[in-house]
Every structure is written in C-alpha cells, then in structure tokens.
Amino acid sequence: MPYDNVNVAKENEKVPCQGKEQLVSILRAAGINVAANDSSVCASLPTWKEVEELYGSEPRILGLETCQRYRDMIQQAQQAKRQDNVTVYPMPRVAGLQNCGTTAFADTLQHNLVVDPTIHSDSPRAYNVPWRKHTPIQFKDFVTSDSYDWQEDKELVLPIVIARDPYRWMASMCEMNYNVNWVFSNRHCPNLVAYPEQNMESAPLENVPVVFALNEPTLKVDVQYPSLAHMWSTFNRDYLEYDAPRLMIRYEDTLFHGEKVFEAIQDCVGGMPSRYISFQPYVWNAKEGSADLVGALTKNGRQQGRYSEMIAEDIDYAIQHLDPELMELLHYVNPTQIPADSYAAEDLRNREN
C-alpha cells in the first residue's frame, strides 16, 4: 500500500503541466528551465487543446507556392553577378503591422539563420524589409530604411509578413498606438464605432476613422482607413495580392510552431544554414514592457481576453468589416455570440440596469 500512495503522489505532481507538455517543450527549447511539475509556470499556461481550438493543429503559412519562383530569382541573380565576383544571398526579411511580434521574429531569424555574411549590423532591424517593416507595400519604392548602409535590391527581398489575430492586434494598438491615430474613447477600446447614446441605440453607429502617419525622409503621407479593422484587412490584403514571392505567417505560429515556421522559411529560400543543430526560440523582450515568452504563450493561447474592452457594437462591426477571406485563410474565427465573461457582455448588462 505505501508504494501505491507514492505512485498517486507522483501522478499528482504531474498535474500542473498535464495537457501542456508541448508548451513546456517550447520553453525548454528557449533555454527556460521548466520542471515537469513546475506549478509556478504551468498553472498560468493554456492547455494545448485550447491552443488548437483557437488556431488549429498546424501552422498556416500563405505563399509557399511562390517559393520556387523566389529560388529561381536568386539563382538568376547569382549567375548574373558571378562575372563581377559578387555573391547574391537570399534575403528573407520581416514585415508586418505594429504590435505583431515583428521585432521578436527578426531577432529569431538573426539568432537562428546564417542569413548573409555581408550584413555587419547586430541590430534585428537589418532583418526587416528595406522599405521599413510597417510601411504598406504600395509605398515600398518610395521608402528605404535609414538603418541600411548597403544597397539591397528590393526586388530580391522575400517579405516574411507577420499577421496577428485581429482582435488581439486591435487591443494591443490601444496599449501602444505608435504613429497610428484615432479618436480614443475612455469607455471602450478598440473603439471601432462611437459609443451608442441612450436615445440612439437603434440608429447606425458612426465608425471611428484611423490615420497611419508615414513620416519618412522620402515620404510623408497620412494613410487613412475607416477603422482599425479596415487597417488590418487592407495592410494584409495588399501583401496577399502582392505580385511577387512572399510568405505570410501568423504571429501565433511563431510562438506555438516556431520550429516548423523556421524550417518552412529555410526551405522556401533554398536551404539557408542554421546556426544551431536545432531551432532555438530567441527569448528577449523585444520592446520595453512587452511580454516575455511565458507571458506571450499565456496571453495568446486562450480565448480569455481576446475581445479586450470592445463593446458589442465594436464586435459586430469587426465581424462585418474584417476581410472574410483573410480570416478564413489564416484560421482566425469571429465570435458567434458575445462571450458571457467579456467586457462587452458586462457593458450590455450595465446599459440594461
């Protein structure tokens, strides 16, 4: 009998991390020492089932069909430059909207890939697209990052576009809006529509326009969108329709399927060598106040908090105006009803009282 009690105790020790083994493996690969029974870490982590319910069981990578074209482009450029004794290297470079983990992913590329020995910068900015990562693709020929002290052929760059769940992206924009401006509300954010007045609840609500201020030495322009939902849709749609090789990767897959994403990029550009025997997630807070890896896995791996401080009308507007094809291709699901534990549900209850 004493042996049975010992076995029961051992089983109980495993409970904190049960169903979360894949997440523990991700943390260990990043050099974070997590014991199999570490309740201080595992208690906060979502289960792998929760992750799969949100994003599916495999990464969604768009644009893989353009990889052969990219490899052919690099090969042709190498042949053309050979007589000048110039080596042309593949150029996977990161792009994406603000608050989509672009800096962290550029760090990860820099940390894992032997990209280009001619890059002498230790800054992850060197692994961003040369037209600056947040610039809408329509302006790529008018902007060149001032962090580049060499000439890169923009046509030989393979953009790696990081897209994020639009609901969490919009919530992050409320916390740090960078050079994106709109009329903020102290009652709800992201505020896609104006808060309904008591005597106008049945009337159509006015949308809240957004202005993205591009302030580059060679381009100063205000890019206007009807709402944050339109900004997410337009930026990513333009890259989806970009008539050149590119990959679109979900931010969440860089967290939960980092190794598979990394291998897909390697294959796409023609097998660029790794710095290490196995993939290593790069752990460093990309910006002051950003979540560490444990925090990022916890925040993005469960449904809770996805709708932030949106009211019901914001959610309805998002459902109507987020690009439906992009949502389906990236496996981002709109809610079918207002979650009972959400800010929106609480706001509706308060209005009824």
Image: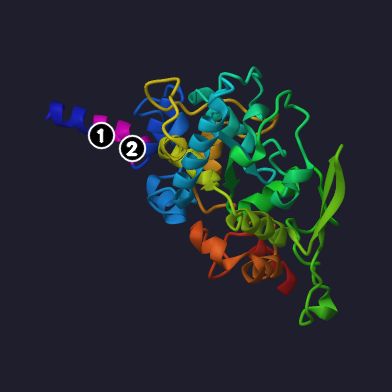
The residue at the point 65 percent across, 50 percent down is 169
Q: Place residue 216 in its image quadrant.
A: top right
Could you tell me residue 15's position as x and y percent? 33, 37
Seen from the viewer's position, the closer of residues 43 and 309 is 309
The residue at the point 72 percent across, 57 percent down is 231
Could you tell me residue 321's position as x and y percent? 66, 68
Q: Is residue 90 visible?
A: no
Left or right of residue 17: residue 294: right
| CA distance for labels 2 and 1 | 7 Å
Q: Which residues are magenta?
A: 9-18
Quarter that holds the C terminus: bottom right
The answer to whether residue 288 is magenta is no
Disc 2 crowd rating (10 Å Cα; few below 14, some 14-19, many 20+) is some
Q: Place residue 117 in its image quadrant.
A: top right
The residue at the point 66 percent across, 23 percent down is 123
Q: Which residue is mark 2?
A: 15
In the image, residue 281 sits, relative to residue 186, either above or below, namely above
Colour scheme of the picture: rainbow
Quarter that holds the N terminus: top left
Residue at the far front in the pictured view: 83
Helix, strand or loop status at disc 2: helix
In the image, residue 253 sits, relative to residue 200, either above or below, namely above
Left or right of residue 49: residue 223: right
Seen from the viewer's position, the closer of residues 242 and 105 is 242
Q: Which residue is mark 1?
A: 11
- Which residue type carries mark 1? Glu
Helix, strand or loop status at disc 1: helix
User: Which SS does the magenta portion mostly show?
Assistant: helix
Residue at the far bottom in the pictured view: 202
Mark 2 touching mark 1, by CB under 8 A? yes
Q: Is residue 348 visible?
A: yes
